Amino acid sequence: MQEVRFKNRTWDVAAHLRVPEGFDENEKYPAIVCAHPISSCKEQTSGSIYAERLTEQGYVTLAFDASHQGESGGEPRYLEDPATRVEDFRCAVDYLMTLDYVDEDRVGVLGVCGGGGYAANATMTDHRIKALVTVVAANYGRLMREGDLSADAAVATLEAVGKQRTAEARGAEPHLTTYIPDSPEEREKAGITDVDIVNAVEYYRTPRGQHPNSPNKLRFSGLEAAFGFDAFHLAEVLLTQPLQIIVGDVPGGFGSYRDGFELFDRARSEKKDIFVVKGASHYDLYDQPKYVDQAFEKITPFFQQNL
């Protein structure tokens, strides 16, 4: 594994580049860009689980930190901006195109959770990407609009965001909120029992998956763009590449089960498949071998056939 950097506009995006065993720089290899979930980083599931395993199967892999997050550059910090997240993919492919040992006609993308939604959006408009896998893909815009199960609540949040932006424009300190409760104790105290939130806290805020580059911080004044974003917009027109969707059949508040079926229905791809991992929740497919192994029973032949 090598630590590398590539540009998105004027800042550096930090990434881990992996090459397979027996690598020969004079050969040509298929390559896969691996994208992390929202609030995550390259050291967690996208890199340590999916990129690592794909590299073992013979692929060059590139797992990157989203701009404004992790070890990547970009100001302001802790910004979750859909347009920039999608551009990160295009810049990642740009970087792969500069590597002589990457076969430019065999580049794929795999995205997990929000990274899967962004991966689908990027694949629609970057047809250098020849094959797409989404693992528990979540449509971040839909989640933001419906998270409170009320259009009025979404509008109220936008009103609050607007007031915070005005305050910051006048010199106030940025307001940093959290994606999830900061500990299992905090979650229990709040009385939150949704399976996705329970498992998110266990993954991100305990030794199971915790990493300092994933600090559970979100810039509140940067939320406006997400409310108007649809990761699957124009999929029925522009998403033509082969598509493999992986979801678990234990639904939770993040909605990746329903999002997976929506993407499947909307994608124009002639070659597409959705695989439901029985008994798996959203976070089981981040790192639990029993369920990740089942996902790879589909992912492995899919990339073999399409890259």
Image (cartoon, grey):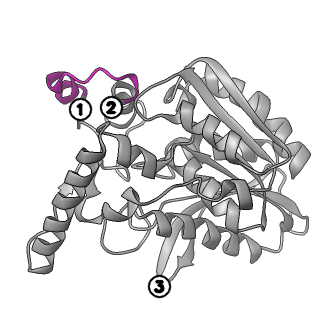
Quick one: label 3 or label 2, which is nearer the N terminus?
Answer: 3
Count every numbered label the image shows and give the total.
3
Task: Write down the quadrant of residue 211 in the picture.
Answer: top left
Q: Quadrant of the N terminus?
A: bottom right
State left or right for residue 163 relative to residue 195: left
Which disc, if any, is residue 183?
1
Quick one: label 1 or label 3, which is nearer the N terminus?
Answer: 3
Type of the residue with mark 3: Thr
Task: Write down the quadrant of residue 202 in the picture.
Answer: top left
Quick one: label 2 or label 1, which is nearer the N terminus?
Answer: 1
Is residue 293 visible to us here? no
Look at the picture and state if 20 lies above or below 222.
above
Which disc, if any, is residue 123?
none
Residues at marks 2 and 1, CA–CA distance in whole angstroms:
6 Å
Task: Write down the quadrant of residue 33 in the picture.
Answer: bottom right
Residue lying at 8% horizontally and 79% vertically, measured from the top left: 171
Neighbourhood count class around disc 2 (C-alpha, 10 Å): few under 14, some 14–19, many 20 upward: many
Q: Secondary structure at mark 1?
A: loop
Q: What segment is highlighted magenta in the picture?
A: 184-196
Look at the picture and state if 257 lies above or below 113.
above
Residue lying at 36% horizontally and 48% vertically, measured from the top left: 144
Q: Between residue 23 and residue 289, name the one nearer to us.
A: 289
Type of the residue with mark 2: Val
Neighbourhood count class around disc 3 (C-alpha, 10 Å): few under 14, some 14–19, many 20 upward: few
Magenta span contains residue 126: no
Task: List the residue tagged with mark 3.
Answer: 10
Which disc, if any, is residue 201?
2
Q: Secondary structure at mark 3?
A: loop
Q: Magenta residues: mostly which secondary structure?
A: helix
Q: Are marks 2 and 1 in contact (CB under 8 Å)?
A: yes
